[in-house]
Image (spheres, helix red, strand yellow):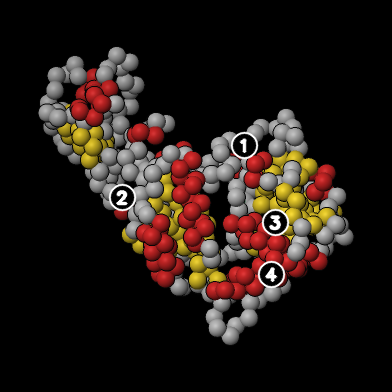
């Protein structure tokens, strides 16, 4: 690496290009496409460094025809004396498949409408899920527990050895800025829970950044920070009144989830497939089972059972995300005098519970009335769940406008 550092000079134009490694003294021509033929196994790393310059691949010209990089660049057929590559289109002509989303995005501190937000295809978040993230939400457009979310972002980043490019203060300021800029809410949804109307959620994503292709994290030069503020879409009011179904996923003999469950990272395929299966069975959330068949957490939530008036929930030690809402609920239970038992939760134990609920930033406290094909208790939201949710609504009401009572179920 020390040799590479002495040979190459890293250049980074954060707005339009990727890191470029220049070999001093080489004459280069800009060309948008990579050589199509495989590289010689014997060529050195210096010879292989067909880098990116101002967003274009470059290759050397004016060098002996035997130069492997010159002889193996027939991709666009332009001659050495013609500097125009006719396969190039302007980036403004590119039709990027971006869904119509009402929102505001900040990329490395530059705020743009959601439909205009772009990051590089060489970003490791896109290529490898090499990123950490958080989801925060507002109540009356005031951010709820932003400090706890930023602390967890820092912890997740540390767990994957990613250096956050901003201080917590800067994250705090920039998140507030996108919330401020995203005042344009969706048209009111008559089915929405009232506490979600006009609110927004902000996804904070930090990727290890862009670089040449390869798993080596050292190829990334500088992290990318993306903040996505969109109108909040929580479960509809009916889901709180009637409860939802959850579907178990994984368990003994099934493929295991990858990565560190305590870090909130972009590695999501296991969770995506879990939710796919849950949706295929008409369930709102997937419950992730460990190798012993115990429920650890939801695909994007923590799980609680209620038995004999006490809460049961898996401890952090079984390998789950330390949910911010979970922590608020544990605090509420303590204040209400509701006993809590943090211990492994076998699937059969959840199925035989009196009540069950999920917690997450966007769901708050959501009653679960069916797990797999089995009803939980009388298949209706239970009194302990309702009590805890009502207390949560009060706690979240801290951000409510003066004189406005927190909305309840
Ligand atoms: C795997 C997982 N567990 C639990 C949660 C709930 O965490 P929080 O309450 O902080 O939103 C999430 C949230 O997305 C999650 O992804």
Distance in Å between CA atoms under marks 3 and 1? 20 Å
Which residue, given by chain and number where applicable, does mark 4 sit on? 391
Please state the horizontal and vertical placement of residue 249, each as a whole percent of the image: 71, 41
Q: Nearer the viewer, mark 2 or mark 1?
A: 1
Q: Nearer the viewer, mark 4 or mark 3?
A: 4
Please state the horizontal and vertical placement of residue 188, each as a whole percent of the image: 58, 75
Q: Quadrant of the C terminus?
A: bottom right
Secondary element type, mark 2: helix
In this orientation, does residue 126 appear? no
Quick check: marks 1 and 4 in contact, CB under 8 Å?
no
Residue 105 lies, with reference to residue 404, above or below; the image says: above
User: Horizontally, is 193 left or right of 343 in the view?
Assistant: left
Which mark is drawn over residue 84? Answer: none
Task: Residue at the far top: name it.
Answer: 42
Q: Examine the image and state in which quarter residue 262 appears.
A: top right
Which residue, given by chain and number where applicable, does mark 1 sit on? 257
Distance in Å between CA atoms under marks 2 and 4? 51 Å
Which residue, given by chain and number where applicable, does mark 3 sit on? 358
Please state the horizontal and vertical placement of residue 19, each as a whole percent of the image: 28, 39
Towards the viewer: 147 or 13: 147
In the rendered structure, which disc, 3 or 1, sits on the residue that comes first in sequence? Answer: 1
Quick check: marks 2 and 3 in contact, CB under 8 Å?
no
Distance in Å between CA atoms under marks 4 and 3? 15 Å
In the rendered structure, which disc, 2 or 1, sits on the residue that comes first in sequence? Answer: 2
Sort mark 2 into few (<14), some (14-19) or many (20+) by Cα contacts within 10 Å.
Answer: few
Sort mark 4 into few (<14), some (14-19) or many (20+) by Cα contacts within 10 Å.
Answer: some
Q: Quadrant of the N terminus?
A: top left
Sort mark 3 into few (<14), some (14-19) or many (20+) by Cα contacts within 10 Å.
Answer: many
Distance in Å between CA atoms under marks 2 and 3? 44 Å
Residue occupying image coordinates x 27% and y 22%: 45
């Amino acid at each position: 690496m020390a040799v590479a550092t002495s040979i190459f000079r890293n250049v980074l134009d954060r707005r339009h290009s990727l890191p470029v490694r220049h070999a001093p003294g080489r004459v280069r021509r800009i060309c948008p496409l990579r050589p199509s033929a495989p590289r010689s196994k014997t060529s050195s790393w210096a010879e292989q460094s067909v880098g990116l310059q101002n967003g274009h691949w470059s290759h050397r010209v004016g060098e002996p025809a035997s130069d492997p990089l010159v002889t193996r660049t027939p991709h666009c057929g332009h001659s050495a004396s013609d500097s125009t590559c006719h396969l190039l289109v302007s980036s403004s002509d590119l039709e990027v498949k971006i869904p119509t989303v009402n929102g505001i995005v900040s990329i490395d501190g530059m705020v743009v409408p959601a439909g205009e937000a772009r990051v590089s295809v060489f970003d490791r978040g896109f290529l490898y899920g090499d990123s950490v993230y958080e989801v925060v939400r507002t109540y009356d457009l005031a951010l709820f527990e932003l400090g706890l979310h930023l602390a967890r972002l820092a912890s997740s980043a540390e767990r994957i050895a990613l250096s956050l490019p901003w201080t917590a203060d800067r994250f705090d300021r920039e998140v507030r800025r996108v919330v401020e800029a995203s005042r344009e809410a969706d048209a009111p949804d008559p089915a929405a829970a009232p506490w979600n109307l006009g609110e927004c959620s902000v996804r904070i994503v930090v990727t290890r950044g862009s670089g040449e292709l390869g798993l080596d994290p050292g190829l990334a030069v500088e992290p990318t920070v993306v903040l996505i503020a969109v109108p909040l879409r929580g479960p509809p009011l009916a889901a709180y009144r009637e409860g939802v179904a959850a579907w178990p996923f994984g368990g003994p003999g099934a493929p295991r989830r990858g990565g560190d469950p305590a870090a909130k990272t972009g590695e999501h395929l296991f969770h995506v497939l879990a939710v796919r299966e849950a949706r295929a069975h008409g369930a709102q959330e997937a419950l992730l089972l460990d190798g012993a068949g115990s429920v650890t957490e939801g695909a994007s939530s923590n799980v609680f059972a209620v038995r004999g008036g006490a809460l049961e929930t898996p401890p952090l030690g079984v390998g789950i995300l330390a949910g911010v809402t979970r922590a608020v609920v544990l605090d509420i239970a303590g204040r209400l005098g509701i006993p809590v038992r943090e211990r492994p939760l076998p699937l059969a134990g959840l199925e035989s519970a009196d009540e069950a609920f999920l917690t997450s930033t966007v769901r708050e406290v959501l009653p679960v009335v069916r797990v797999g094909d089995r009803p939980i208790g009388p298949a209706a939201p239970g009194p302990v769940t309702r009590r805890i949710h009502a207390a949560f609504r009060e706690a979240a009401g801290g951000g409510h406008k003066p004189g406005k009572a927190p909305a309840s179920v």
